[in-house]
Image (cartoon, rainbow, N blue to C red):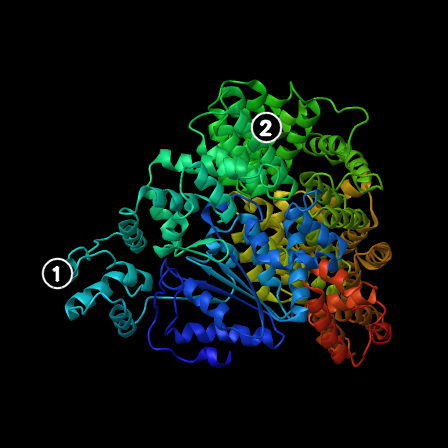
């Protein structure tokens, strides 16, 4: 950063009349910030989180960065505690200088930002699609000049802005954009970004700073005492002695602070400066403290309403507690705290009332409503209704957190007890939608304290069950949802059936419930659900099908399950309407061994989720699509889907459920990675939710062990899963258990598994299930009968998209032929198996085929990769989308990266493939695009 990096000799020097300070020292911190700027100038993108206690100098470092950096454009925003519930307030503050470039963005991104900021009405966009729009806007600005975004007091950003900015920070690659956050303690959103911790000054620098304060010479003992008391905190060093007499300083009186937090000591120092001020001046400063915007026009109007003369602003600036640039800005956020803590509740209400009257109801109705709420002395229905209107506007902008906050305050100010309880319940629902289940539970308990009302009680129990389901407390969720269904039935029979389905799904995902609330109790209660409406919805058929499976057996349930699947996966199906139904639908497809339906449902959910911004549903769809790609033997495509799933999981901060990756690693024989992913899966859910996760882990362990030839271990893992009979896992556990049992001589287990599978193939046959059934019969048969079943298995599986099982069918047939000493025939089957498995990348099973081939006297080449396989998963995914004709902007929207980053990766791809244009991709890539 050129001359800006020169080392200065001290730390802070106050500038009279304001809060500006000159940064001295801090060489390590300045070098870290300088490295970020240099990288941005060089075309890279970087993010950095600067953290430390209040007063340690974070803002001074940001000021230095802004003032001393040249050759880049800087935009800045500061979090304000009073604005934490106003959606996208900080984001608007940061991007306001760049909004004239909105028209340069693709229409969906442009519309998302216009809706976020209330520039134009529209459907609430998903905040992560909005995050992509922010990323695109920043990249566009950086095309002209490298851009640095400076965000101070991140701990006080509104939740919507914080999530979007964290998303952008994680997606930065090659846009020439830098993001610098300053915060007291890194939030969960920022925890995985590069960190710079700012600590107190070294003793030598702290002594130099004290010497610069101008309080006269300090006794060395007193100076060391001050440094020790403040732990080298620069603001504390400057403020602790402020207002003390020379005698107090000389004697060390007032310096000892006991065990109080340092922030409290600094705040008390500011209070010592505030308390002696004239009443009119304190009134003006309090107005500024409770107004998060710092708009001089509004502040002037409010001051006039409180009888504060205009010239008082000049006196306020002279205190050094505030400055105007162009908005009112405090020397430190603790000044706000000192002002409010030194004011009476009535004085604070008067300030909010004046600000409400001074705020234009047409230009800023939400801020006016907020001030009115904080000025209220008791219940006020007019204010409550105004807050409800603000909640509606916040929801339209996608500000779920703000929606919940407005609704909660509306409920608090509602005079009528029944209406207050209903509003509080609505606020609790909004809190859950805002991904705040603990807050939702808190508000739910308040709502339940209201007057008795049967419908509201039913709604409350349903919400309580949804909260438990969201927290993965499956057995408890099922129990609560059962009660909610019974309570809701008199009011809404159709919704009651949906709640019963939620309860059943919770029970299925949670394995079994405890004690009297067993799975059978859930099923028994659901059998008494209201009759389905006419014509029945897919959710109705699905509920009846699951009940039939639990009570009447597969022979009766099979046709009903198939009909439910037909309705959901058909062109008019509603698989994308409800997430719980979508999950149940995918499990249903696996229960019926219907790979095509599973792929169809997941593809539909993927399309609906991308169109509506339902990222939770998109994560479910990507997981299913990833599993489908592995089963289809398309491992390269599976890696791309897994990469996108990882990006989405990281962007949303949700747990990583690595099901596709675990299956991929199991087929490849990567034992260490499978173990790691199993632990990741276990940690992703609480103990009560492990019933939905650990059976799948058991299936993957069985695949792994069978591939490595450890059939005894595979038998143990698969048997444990099979005995639990989890819904939807039959296609994964049956092949493993039967093969492991056959290879260890356990014919009884093979017989038992065959009986289980035959019931399903008789009721709802598919080529997949019949192909595996033929394999099991081959395990039990001998001679020509066995050979016929092996050939039938190959023929049936060849009609499906389950290529891994087709390849294994050739392998098992070849192994049987070798044991029958038919080496020539065995070589043909084993060569086919080896070539298929090696081409897929199923290394464990390919190596098994290779060993069998060697035993027949033949040879097989080990798999090698050509230079095309050197593409990273992200590069391969970008290449596939580019080959399909998507533009850079469209690819970026799919992968949550900027168009400029797409261009950067494509240049690397072209270099690796030895081409210079997209039109050449067809010539250098195989037909499948991998």
N-term-proximal mark, 2 vs 1: 1
> Quick one: SS at disc 1?
helix
Query: Is 395 located above or below residue 826 in the figure?
Result: above
Q: Residue at x 68, y 70 (%)?
A: 143
- Determine which quarter of the picture holds residue 512: top right
Q: Which mark is residue 399?
A: none
Q: Quadrant of residue 928?
A: bottom right
Q: Tell which of 708 and 397 is nearer to you.
A: 397
Disc 2 target residue: 482
Nearer to us in this view, 313 or 572: 313
Measured as percent of width and height from the top left, residue 926 is found at 83, 72
Drawn side of residue 681 relative to residue 818, left or right = left
Q: Is residue 188 above or below residue 283?
A: below
**Picture quadrant of residue 745:** bottom right
Measuring from the top left, give residue 452's x and y in whole percent.
51, 18
Determine crowd level at label 1: few under 14, some 14-19, many 20+ residues with C-alpha closer than 10 A: few
- The residue under label 1 is 251
Of the residues tagged 2 and 1, which is closer to the observer? Answer: 1
Number of other residues with Cα within 10 Å of mark 2, as a class: few under 14, some 14 to 19, many 20 or more: many
804 or 792: nearer the eye?
804
Residue 258, position as x, y percentages in the image:
21, 53
Up-down relation of residue 370 to residue 70 (above or below)? above
């Amino acid at each position: 950063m050129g001359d800006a990096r020169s080392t200065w000799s001290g730390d802070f020097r106050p500038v009279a009349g304001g809060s500006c300070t000159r940064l001295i020292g801090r060489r390590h911190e300045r070098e870290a910030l300088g490295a970020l700027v240099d990288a941005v100038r060089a075309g890279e993108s970087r993010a950095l989180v600067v953290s430390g206690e209040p007063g340690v100098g974070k803002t001074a470092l940001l000021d230095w960065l802004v003032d001393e950096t040249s050759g880049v454009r800087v935009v800045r925003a500061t979090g304000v505690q009073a604005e934490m519930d106003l959606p996208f307030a900080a984001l608007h503050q940061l991007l306001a200088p760049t909004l004239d470039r909105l028209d340069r963005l693709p229409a969906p991104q442009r519309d998302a930002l216009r809706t976020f900021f209330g520039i134009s009405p529209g459907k609430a966009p998903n905040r992560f699609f909005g995050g992509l729009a922010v990323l695109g806007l920043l990249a566009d600005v950086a095309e002209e000049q490298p851009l640095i975004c400076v965000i101070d007091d991140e701990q006080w950003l509104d939740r919507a802005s914080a999530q979007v900015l964290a998303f952008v920070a994680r997606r930065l690659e090659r846009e020439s954009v830098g993001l610098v956050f300053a915060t007291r303690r890194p939030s969960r959103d920022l925890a995985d970004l590069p960190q710079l911790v700012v600590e107190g000054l070294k003793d030598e620098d702290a002594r130099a700073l004290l010497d610069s304060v101008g309080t006269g010479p300090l006794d060395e003992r007193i100076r060391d005492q001050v440094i020790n008391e403040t732990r080298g905190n620069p603001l504390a060093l400057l403020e602790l002695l402020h207002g003390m007499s020379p005698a107090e300083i000389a004697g060390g009186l007032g310096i000892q602070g006991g065990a109080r937090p340092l922030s409290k000591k600094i705040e008390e120092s500011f209070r010592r400066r505030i308390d002696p001020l004239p009443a009119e001046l304190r009134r003006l400063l309090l107005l500024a403290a409770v107004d998060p915007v710092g708009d001089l026009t509004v502040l002037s109007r409010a001051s006039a309403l409180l009888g504060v003369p205009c010239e008082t602003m000049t006196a306020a600036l002279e205190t050094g507690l505030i400055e105007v640039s162009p908005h009112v800005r405090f020397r430190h956020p603790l000044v706000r705290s000192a002002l409010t803590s030194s004011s009476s509740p009535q004085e604070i209400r008067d300030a909010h009332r004046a600000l409400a009257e001074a705020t234009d109801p047409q230009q800023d109705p939400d801020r006016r409503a907020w001030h009115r709420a904080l000025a209220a002395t008791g219940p006020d229905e007019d204010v409550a209704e105004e807050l409800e209107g603000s909640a509606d506007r916040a929801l339209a902008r996608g500000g779920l957190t703000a929606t919940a906050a407005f609704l909660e305050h509306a409920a608090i100010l509602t005079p009528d007890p029944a209406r207050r309880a209903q509003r509080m319940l609505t606020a609790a629902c909004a809190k859950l939608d805002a991904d705040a289940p603990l807050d939702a539970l808190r508000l739910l308990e308040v709502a339940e304290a209201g007057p008795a009302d049967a419908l509201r009680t039913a709604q409350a129990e349903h919400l309580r069950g949804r909260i438990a389901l969201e927290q993965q407390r499956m057995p408890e969720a099922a129990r609560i949802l059962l009660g909610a269904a019974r309570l809701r039935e008199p009011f809404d029979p159709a919704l009651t059936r949906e709640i019963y389905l939620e309860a059943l799904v919770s029970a299925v995902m949670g394995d079994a419930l405890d004690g009297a609330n067993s799975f059978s109790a859930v099923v028994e209660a659901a059998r008494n659900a209201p009759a389905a409406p006419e014509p029945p919805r897919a959710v109705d058929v699905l509920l009846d099908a699951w009940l039939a499976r639990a009570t009447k057996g597969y022979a009766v349930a099979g046709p009903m399950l198939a009909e439910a699947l037909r309705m959901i996966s058909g062109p008019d199906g509603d698989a994308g309407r409800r997430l719980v139904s979508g999950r149940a639908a995918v499990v249903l497809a696996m229960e019926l061994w219907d790979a095509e339906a599973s792929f169809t449902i997941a593809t539909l959910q993927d399309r609906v989720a991308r169109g509506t911004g339902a990222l939770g549903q998109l994560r479910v769809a990507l997981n299913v699509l990833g599993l489908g790609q592995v089963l289809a033997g398309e491992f390269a495509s599976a890696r791309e889907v897994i990469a996108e799933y990882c990006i989405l999981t990281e962007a949303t901060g949700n747990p990583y459920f690595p099901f596709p990756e675990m299956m991929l690693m199991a087929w490849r024989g990567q034992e260490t990675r499978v173990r790691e992913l199993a632990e990741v899966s276990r940690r992703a859910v609480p103990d009560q939710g492990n019933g939905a996760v650990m059976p799948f882990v058991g299936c993957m362990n069985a695949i792994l062990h069978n591939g490595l030839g450890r059939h005894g271990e595979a038998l143990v893992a698969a048997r444990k899963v099979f005995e639990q009979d989890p819904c939807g896992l039959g296609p994964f556990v049956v092949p493993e258990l039967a093969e492991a049992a056959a290879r260890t001589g356990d014919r009884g287990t093979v017989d038992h598994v065959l009986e289980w599978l035959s019931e399903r193939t008789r009721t709802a046959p598919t080529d997949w299930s019949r192909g595996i059934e033929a394999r099991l019969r081959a395990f039990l048969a001998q001679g020509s009968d066995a050979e016929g079943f092996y050939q039938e298995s190959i023929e049936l599986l060849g009609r499906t998209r389950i290529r891994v099982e087709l390849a294994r069918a050739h392998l098992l047939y070849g192994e049987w032929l070798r044991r029958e000493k038919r080496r020539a025939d065995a070589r043909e089957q084993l060569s086919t198996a080896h070539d298929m498995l090696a081409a897929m990348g199923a290394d464990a099973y390919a190596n098994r085929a290779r060993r069998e081939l060697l035993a027949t006297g033949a040879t097989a080449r080990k798999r090698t990769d050509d230079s095309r396989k050197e593409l990273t998963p992200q590069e391969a995914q970008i290449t596939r989308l580019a080959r399909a004709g998507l533009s850079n902007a469209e690819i970026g929207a799919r992968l949550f990266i900027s168009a400029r980053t797409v261009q950067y990766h494509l240049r690397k791809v072209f270099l690796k493939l030895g081409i210079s244009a997209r039109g050449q991709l067809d010539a250098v890539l195989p037909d499948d695009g991998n």
